[in-house]
Image: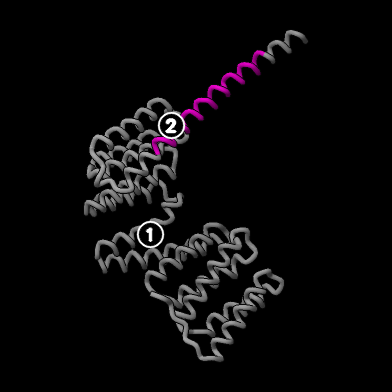
């Protein structure tokens, strides 16, 4: 028994030493990263006025940290910062090289790799290389479609064509995005996937200025997820403000807003949001009675 206790004591002491070393190592890294990130933020605030030597120095500091702490959870992100520095100093090839290091070293980290590919796509887009931009988007779709970035990809493609002035391709991409998010919503009822799909649908409709469809989708979100944990107080407030804004300032349709709130209260008579709905219905009635037209400030 005494021998067993001695062995256990040695094992525990060894574990304590290992954990202490790891803790000290991570703490040391955190302190160094804090200082490096302050310098990064300073440089990126106005990179055009920063001398080349300062870029070189900061890049070298990141590379030194990568070499010293290859297994740290924060190390992969350093390649993103190095890539951003190279982009800021006008060296897209080196930027892409560093983003690519993430794909080589961390192929099993889906979200990280999707982020690296998105950075590669944006780098090519900034250099007006459509083929390589689309190739990076395709790589996200093929390999990391189940990540948040992959889920946003149809919208990212549409935005790319909008920003590059390809009107016909933009419209085609928007139509595909709508079909994609509607399909995801149908296939994943009452889930986080449906919730996210419907929110992105609203974003697409806003871009189209399809206000009626936007309100329909906002109403669907409220009714479908009224009692879900996904419907936080902050999100509910945002959806309600959005419905008010669209109905009253874009559609000039008081009745549409009334319909949403009346239906919600009928389907969820004990819901905590009903007090807010009642106040809104009262305010809308006042506006109607006074024939007030609501506008937004430009």
Q: Nearer the viewer, residue 153 or 116?
A: 116
In this view, the residue farthest toward the right is 1
Is 138 located above or below residue 210 in the figure? above
Judge the density around disc 2: few (<14), some (14-19), many (≥20) Cα neighbours within 10 Å: some
- Which structural element holds mark 2? helix
Whole-percent x, y for residue 111 in the image: 44, 45
- Please say which color scheme the image uses: one colour
Label 2 vs label 1: CA separation?
Answer: 38 Å
- Which structural element holds mark 1? helix
The residue positioned 65% from the left and 64% from the top of the image is 227
Horizontally, residue 2 falls left or right of residue 287, namely: right
**In this figure, which residue is indicated by the disc labeled 1?**
154
Whole-percent x, y for residue 142 in the image: 37, 48
The residue positioned 30% from the left and 59% from the top of the image is 160
Q: Dividing the picture into quarters, in which one does residue 88 lie?
A: top left
Give the position of the N terminus as an image quadrant: top right
Whole-percent x, y for residue 257 in the image: 54, 80
Horizontally, residue 235 falls left or right of residue 83, namely: right
Horizontally, residue 5 falls left or right of residue 241, namely: right
The residue positioned 37% from the left and 44% from the top of the image is 41
Q: Nearer the viewer, residue 2 or 47?
A: 47
Q: Is residue 52 magenta?
A: no
Judge the density around disc 1: few (<14), some (14-19), many (≥20) Cα neighbours within 10 Å: many
**In this figure, which residue is indicated by the disc labeled 2?**
32
In this view, the residue farthest toward the top is 3
The magenta stretch is 10-37
Horizontally, residue 221 falls left or right of residue 147, namely: right
Give the position of the C terminus as an image quadrant: bottom left
Q: Are marks 2 and 1 in contact (CB under 8 Å)?
A: no
Is 179 located above or below residue 85 in the figure? below
The residue positioned 65% from the left and 13% from the top of the image is 10
Mark earlier in primary sequence (2, 1): 2
């Amino acid at each position: 028994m005494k021998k067993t206790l001695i062995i256990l004591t040695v094992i525990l002491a060894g574990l304590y030493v290992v954990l202490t070393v790891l803790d000290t190592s991570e703490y040391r890294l955190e302190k160094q990263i804090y200082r490096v990130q302050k310098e990064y933020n300073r440089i990126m605030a106005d990179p055009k006025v920063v001398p080349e030597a300062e870029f070189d120095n900061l890049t070298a500091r990141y590379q030194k940290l990568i070499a010293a702490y290859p297994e740290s959870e924060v190390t992969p992100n350093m390649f993103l910062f190095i890539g951003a520095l190279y982009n800021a100093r006008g060296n897209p090839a080196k930027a892409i090289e560093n983003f690519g290091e993430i794909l080589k070293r961390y192929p099993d980290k889906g979200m990280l790799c999707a982020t690296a590919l998105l950075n590669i796509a944006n780098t090519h887009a900034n250099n007006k290389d459509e083929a390589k931009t689309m190739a990076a988007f395709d790589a996200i779709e093929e390999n990391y479609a189940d990540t948040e970035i992959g889920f946003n990809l149809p919208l990212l493609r549409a935005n790319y064509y909008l920003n590059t002035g390809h009107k016909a391709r933009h419209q085609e991409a928007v139509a595909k995005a709508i079909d994609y998010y509607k399909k995801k919503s149908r296939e994943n009822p009452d889930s986080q996937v449906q919730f996210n799909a419907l929110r992105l649908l609203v974003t697409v409709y806003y871009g189209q200025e399809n206000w009626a469809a936007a309100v329909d989708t906002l109403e669907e979100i409220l009714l479908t997820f009224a009692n879900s944990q996904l419907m936080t107080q902050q999100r509910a407030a945002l959806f309600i403000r959005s419905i008010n804004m669209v109905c009253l300032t874009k559609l000039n349709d008081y009745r549409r807003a009334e319909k949403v709130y009346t239906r919600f209260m009928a389907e969820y008579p004990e819901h905590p949001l009903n007090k807010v709905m009642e106040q809104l219905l009262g305010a809308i009635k006042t506006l109607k009675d006074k024939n007030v037209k609501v506008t937004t400030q430009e």
